[in-house]
Amino acid sequence: MARNAEYLSPEIVNQGVEDSGPYAGSPSFRVKVRRGLPDFLNSVNLKYVKLGYGYLLSHGIYFVAAPVLLATFGTQIWKLTWTNSFLDFNNFLNLIALLVFFCSVLYVYLDLTPRATYLVDFACYRPPNELKISKEEFTDLAKRSGKFSDAAIEFQQRVLKNSGLGDETYLPRIIFQPDHKITLRDGREEASMLMFGAVDNLLAATRISPKDIKILIVNCGVLNPTPSLSAMIINHYKLRHKIQSFNLGGMGCAAGVTAIDLAKDLLSAYPGSYALVVSIEAMTFTWYAGRELDMLLPNCFFRMGSAAILLSNHPTDRWRAKYELKQLVRTHKAMDSRSFKSIHLKEDAEGKKGLSVSKDVIEVGGHALKANITTLGPLVLPVSEQFHFFTSLLFKKKSKPYIPDYKRAFEHVCILATSKKVLDEIQKNLDLTNEYMEASRRTLERFGNTSSSSVWYELAYLEANKKIKRGDRIWQIALGSGFKCNSAVWKALRNVKQQNRNPWNDAED
């Protein structure tokens, strides 16, 4: 208990007066412990700071080599043109040889330097209005389905009340039909609507041909049929037979950023190509109709949604792309058993399948988030913030270390819209203002937790409200089963205007 005491929030509850026994007439108390995110101010694991600087040095070699190369070449040109006669034949041959050598080195340098990854555009799918379900209707449909006990309905109703979700989130109504057993066909139909809806919007916005897509990556949490979801997209849009296709399954809400990382690496292997990333959350196969409370939690927070993202590393696409990927850091804590078991798919005592969410999930998620941002810090924070951090470590060892102000590194933050409680905890630990949390809270209210596509609905919210200006830095934070925490940092290449196919168009707010 002592080892984890810093992450527990004790609360003393008065239970009244003892009626009998040796303490009769005395007041009775019990201590109620609530688990929360670890206090980021208490400790800093220096191995993650070292890892962040390792990333910085490994990528910084390319920027250091360029001025050294130019300085060396410039010095030689100076010697040949000013210290000797330029018209000298031998000197002229030396100059030609030096130019050839410089061009060769420059070609190798440009070939080895990683290309920038551009986000040409993205699109989020808004399901039809007939799939909107309010919290009151959710409870009513759950009762009429006959699949839940009174205790299960009361629990879900209580959780929904404080979830942060509004009354316009989307669910497939087939999950509430009495005596209907969910089939694979139901899951495929929902996935088709979500995937094709998002991809159609993206193709219409970018006006590229499906034949131009060379890389396809699809991720979904629970639904993983055969043929795969990626194969369904290839078949529907008749993509090229040489396409590099990948289907990521069982990786939870953080899989969307993982897919971006994979796409970036594949674009390096196939330069000048387009990569399509599709992230969806299909509720049909996530839905649980049983009695166990830890498995009923996903019913209250997860909702259907999808996003399609088009990436490129061709230099000419910079002029029409919206964003450039600046940093991407992934943290995995599956080596720890508590983290590994915090979210997992299982069957209850009656054989009903569902996602189980442990009571430790907020705490282990906090550990993953803390490790991730500690690694990310050296890559994004201003030098002044890093200087204060290291001086506090060197000269004030007995006090808490200085925690850098991440608001100085980003203009916008998109945190996975998991639940109101998680967003409250992250806001407090990172000392973020309400303005930084606005996109996450509004997305949770309007669309619910759409898993890996959530951070894209949040970015779409910022675009719809005309908040993205040229040069703005956007930090996407995604957490998921495993336990994982992934960060992606984007830089806006232009002022982003609201588009007709934005899912926030015609919203009541």
Image (spheres, helix red, strand yellow):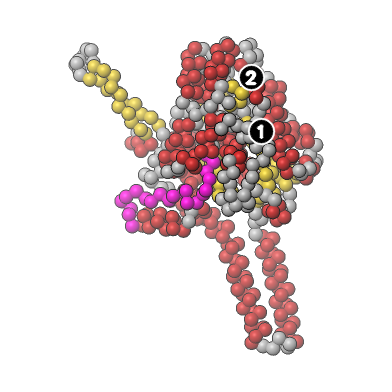
Relative to 432, is 176 on the left or the right?
Answer: right
State the quadrant of the N terminus: top left
State the extent of the magenta-drawn residues as a range. 395-415
**Amino acid type, mark 2:** Arg
The x and y percentages for residue 308 are 67, 38
The x and y percentages for residue 80 are 67, 83
Say which residue appears at 35% left-offset and 38% top-offset.
6
Which element type, helix, strand or loop, lies under badge 1?
Answer: loop
Report the magenta stretch's main SS: loop
Say which residue appears at 61% left-offset and 23% top-offset.
132
The x and y percentages for residue 293 are 48, 20
Say which residue appears at 44% left-offset and 35% top-offset.
424
Task: Rate crowding at label 2 as few (under 14), some (14 to 19) or many (20 or more) other CA atoms within 10 Å.
Answer: some
Specify which label sits upstream in the sequence, 2 or 1.
1
**Amino acid type, mark 1:** Tyr
Say which residue appears at 58% left-offset and 30% top-offset.
508
The verdict on residue 71 being magenta is no
The numbered disc on residue 125 is 1
- Give the residue at mark 2: 173
Q: Is residue 208 above or below residue 75?
A: above
Front position in the image: 212 or 168: 168
Task: Rate crowding at label 1 as few (under 14), some (14 to 19) or many (20 or more) other CA atoms within 10 Å.
Answer: many
Relative to 450, is 202 on the left or the right?
Answer: right
Does the rendering let one see residue 428? Answer: yes
Number of numbered discs on residues: 2
Question: How far apart, in angstroms, are the residues tagged by discs 2 and 1?
Answer: 18 Å
Which element type, helix, strand or loop, lies under badge 2?
Answer: helix
Q: Is residue 303 above or below residue 102?
A: above
The verdict on residue 413 being magenta is yes
